[in-house]
Amino acid sequence: MFAPVYLDWNASTPLDERVREAMLPFLGVRFGNASSRHEYGRQARDAISRARQQVAAAVGAHETEVVFTSGGSEANNLFIKGAAAMRQPGLIAIGATEHPCVREPAHQLQRLGWQVQELPVTAEGTSDVAAAAALIAEKRPALVSQMLANNETGVVNDVAALALHVKAAGGLLHADAVQALGKTPVSFRGLGVNALTLSSHKIGGPIGAGALVLDKRVELQPLIAGGGHERGLRSGTENVAAIVGFGLACELVTADLASRVQHMRDVREVLEAGLSALGARLFGADATRLPNTSYFAFAGIDGETLVGKLDRAGFAVASGAACSSANPEPSRTLVAMGVEDGLARGAVRVSVGPATALSDVKRFVEVLRETVTALRNLSAVSA
């Protein structure tokens, strides 16, 4: 079977074999409902409790602050909609480069009388803390959501600095840390946030599990009501196998974080040396970034076209544009950074992982060189 070299680790990660082994009993003989009072139920409940401890330990939280969800999107929605439902309509401020699962629920609140304001970013794509502080002091938003690390550029935001201003203004601060966990240290207490979103499948765990780490003093209205699971914040019979896998994945990525980060950084340095030699524009290059992410474009070359050709050549990478055949749009992140639309439409993201081989990245650079040259020659002929 044709299997391209995987260079899209920010989208999803392969399931760690150790995680798979830990999950298997809960897909077989340990099939109990965690709400049941018999032995089968107790096995499931104990497994969930263990996973809750592992997730909490990964971000320096207390196990009672972990609310399991189906993933990062649900966790983000739970905080934004749940916190808004417990308050009078006011202002919610979100980062200009937030993921759609933060941006869209925030804008949905406008139907309920909430106002939405975007916090500005610098030309490198990082949160402009000084400008955000001025806005927060003047408008005093009730809710603020600022991602810790951007999924496209990999830039890391100074959420801890922002937290001081949000707290002084009497607001609640949420951070989407989905991309950050496993690539940089993440501390719930150190960031000073009221809520933090995590996702399993970004760290070698299964798809279908995530968590909202929530300060217990913050009241939320649940998105899903019913049996009172997860302290009443997320009803529904728990996906025990996925939760078990998520817990172990958290333990594994934090246990060897330093070596993982060093490997990814070493691989990325080789990649970006090659990109520089090819004349690529690297976005967020001068900002603090995750060690695994490179977001780039070549002037005059369409990103979707380049991604398709690289896929056929044996390399799985991502386009930065949210495109449809009827309405191709440039990356909202790059537009917020002030990148012109034409170049933004050419954006391509390469994200490596702890299993990415240096030899594969070197070969990718060579194939990229050949592909870019061919596209440029084609453009010259067409002109």
Image (cartoon, helix red, strand yellow):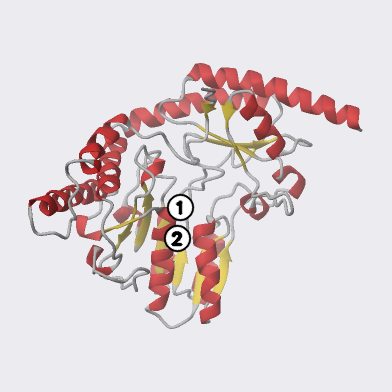
In this figure, what is the number of numbered marks? 2
Which numbered dot is residue 162?
A: 2
Q: Distance between the residues labelled 2 and 1?
A: 7 Å
* Residue 234, above or below 250: below
Towards the viewer: 49 or 190: 49
Judged left or right of residue 189, residue 348 is right
- The residue lying furthest to the right in this view is 383
- Proximity of marks 2 and 1: CB atoms separated by less than 8 Å: yes
Residue 317's place in the image compared with 179, above or below, is above
40 on left or right of 230: left
Three-letter amino acid code at the position of disc 1: Asp
Query: Which quarter of the figure is the C terminus placed in?
Result: top right
Q: Position of residue 377 (x, y in %)?
A: 83, 24
Seen at 65% across and 46% down, the residue is 321
Q: What element carries label 1?
A: loop
Which residue in the structure is indicated by mark 1?
A: 158
Q: Which of 311 and 330 is in front in this view?
A: 311
Classify 207 as above or below 233.
Answer: above
Please name whichever residue, 363 or 277, is drawn nearer the observer in this view of the structure.
363
Residue 171 appears in view: no
Residue drawn at point x = 12 percent, y = 50 percent = 40
Tell me if 234 is positioned left or right of 288 in this view. Answer: left
For label 2, count other residues whose C-alpha is less than 10 Å away and answer few (under 14), some (14-19) or many (20+): many
* Quarter occupied by residue 128: bottom right
The amino acid beneath tag 2 is: Leu
Query: Where does the image place residue 294, in percent across and percent down from the top left?
Result: 57, 35
Q: Residue at x 58, y 17 (%)?
A: 363
Circle 1 packing at 10 Å, graded few (<14), some (14-19), many (20+), is: some
